Amino acid sequence: MASPSSGFWSFGAQDGNKEQDNPGPAKAWCQVAQKFTGGISSKLTAFLYGEGEKSSEPGTKDDMGSENKEMASNYDKSECGCQKRELDFSLLYSTDLLPAKNGEADTLRFLQEVMDILLQYIVKTFDRSTKVIDFHYPSELLQEYNWELSEHPETLDEILLNCKTTLKYAIKTGHPRYFNQLSTGLDMVGLAADWLTSTANTNMFTYEIAPVFVLLEYVTLKKMREMIGWPGGSGDGIFSPGGAISNLYAMLIARFKMFPEVKEKGMAAIPRLVAFTSEHSHFSVKKGAAALGIGTDSVILIKCDERGKMIPSDLERRIIEAKQKGFVPFFVSATAGTTVYGAFDPLIAIADVCKKYKIWMHVDGAWGGGLLMSRKHKWKLNGVERANSVTWNPHKMMGVPLQCSALLVREEGLMQNCNQMHASYLFQQDKHYDLSYDTGDKALQCGRHVDIFKLWLMWRAKGTTGFEAQIDKCLELAEYLYNKIKNREGYEMVIDGKPQHTNVCFWYVPPSLRNMENNEERMSRLSKVAPVIKARMMEYGTTMVSYQPHSDKVNFFRMVISNPAASHQDIDFLIEEIERLGQDL
């Protein structure tokens, strides 16, 4: 065992009074811990209650709650005579931090400064008076700051400045008025879990180096399969780097299921394969086909109705056509929550077609899978239990910090057989524990990030009912927006009827276009409205919402709501802001 004056407990400077600079272990830890926790709590409290930097010293009466006061009094009663040492980070480098000898105190103080930066950013994120974005053009940011990497180290003072600068220009994706992407929000438990995950800094390929994380992935994937409706949560699954990769996995496994010889012999050994997906599906289906050597020309797009749902009769027609041409249909990707319209394909009818022609049915529920948490809305995924595989991204509707995407597979063992390579340096067969928990060989990756802990910890903190309430609220806000603008002057809906998901698609029509005949010139001018308003939003920093053209429709706004911090007042603000920024167009 290390002596009290060495290792972790050695906080003193190299010179000076030995009793003062190298105190006993308990006293030294008290001093550093008080500085660490007191600094964070006092600065955060001051920021929250508008007291600025009134009391920057830890242990003062002004910046401490009763618990901290009691702790401080205990410190005061002790005989700790250590002198507090304010660090000059301009004289320190990363080599002064752990694992450097006697680096504990400097490390804790450095991390305190980092935490202060992060906590202030978090508080600002939820403050509606702050900007969503401090927009600068790329050329401006490149000229204003030196981002280049150098041969020699920078001081810790410069590193802290880098942290502040990075967050200054970061988009506050947790801001209640950020609606730009499907992944929004900032969950505190999820954030804490992400910090823990980075601290643990391990890999998901074997139980021996990630025992708890591997077990949590097993438990959570089983629960998700139960919610899909597979008996007893049977099947398999894995967390992957995003929905696009989960969809790629599904296509890979479907091909292996039909032609297992492709794993060794390649595409030349099998017939020409074709896959089917809706014309409104995510582009990752085509990307997967390209990556797997199947080719984008082998992805057949199925027609959708006016609400963006796949038409099953057209699916069957195109399958028959492909078979008549000598192609082999092997994969149908239905969508539960399309990216633009938020449409849910009719899964039961699609499942009937897939069963009839013996084709693998995949459901891309990256965006809509979270609705399985809601008793009110899960009917929109009726038939998902008949799928062979499902993509589900908790980092979207469930608000789990990026990234967190799961592929769920109904047949157990298929993913392992498809991907395993038996690397003997990782997956030794004579280990002393159950080898089924060495999950790495069923993944395409070798190194795999721990994405499970933030989902698991949030689920523990909220329960299924907490996620349900969060999701129901977002869908209610989408319906609120729809009801506010459907008959409002200056707004035109892209599709009729209440939103299927939280996607609300609309045009803002400025006064200059409202009485124009609906012709090509009007469409040309209308197509320029959304981009200009979006640019102004970013310049002012007030809000962000996405826009795009779609099929034969010119640029329109696609509003999506997945942030539980958003409220009715934020929806009202968005409407008024669009009108303010677009009145003169």
Image (cartoon, rainbow, N blue to C red):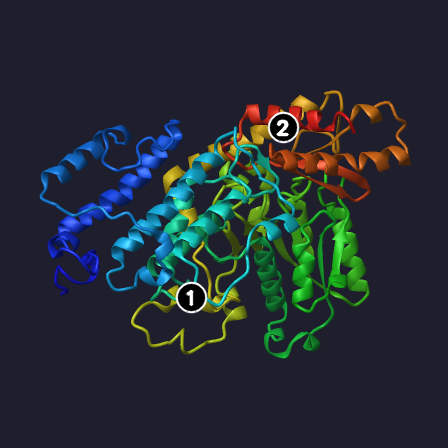
Query: Residue placed farthest to the front in the image?
Result: 16
The Cα–Cα distance between marks 2 and 1, rounded to whole angstroms, is 45 Å
- For the residue carrying disc 2, how many other residues have a C-alpha within 10 Å: few (<14), some (14-19), or many (20+)? many
Q: Which residue is tagged 2? A: 574
Report the amino acid beneath label 1: Phe
Q: Which residue is tagged 1? A: 205
The quadrant where residue 123 appears: top left
Residue 70 lies left or right of residue 466; in this view the side is left
- For the residue carrying disc 1, how many other residues have a C-alpha within 10 Å: few (<14), some (14-19), or many (20+)? many
Question: Relative to 413, is 581 above or below?
Answer: above
- Numbered circles on residues, count: 2
Quarter of the N terminus within the rendering: bottom left
Report the amino acid beneath label 2: Leu
* Percent x, y of residue 105: 26, 54
Observer-side mark, 2 or 1, equals 2
Residue 270 lies left or right of residue 197; in this view the side is right
Residue 244 lies left or right of residue 533; in this view the side is left
Q: Nearer the viewer, residue 339 or 509?
A: 509
Q: Residue at x 53, y 67 (%)?
A: 444
First-in-chain label (2 vs 1) = 1
Residue 353 lies left or right of residue 122; in this view the side is right
For label 2, the SS is helix
Q: Residue at x 23, y 48 (%)?
A: 32
Q: Residue at x 78, y 49 (%)?
A: 314
For label 1, the SS is loop
The quadrant where residue 575 appears: top right
The reply to whether the C-beta atoms of the residues labelled 2 and 1 are less than 8 Å apart is no
Question: Relative to 312, is 275 above or below?
Answer: below
* Percent x, y of residue 384: 58, 47
* Percent x, y of residue 257: 59, 66
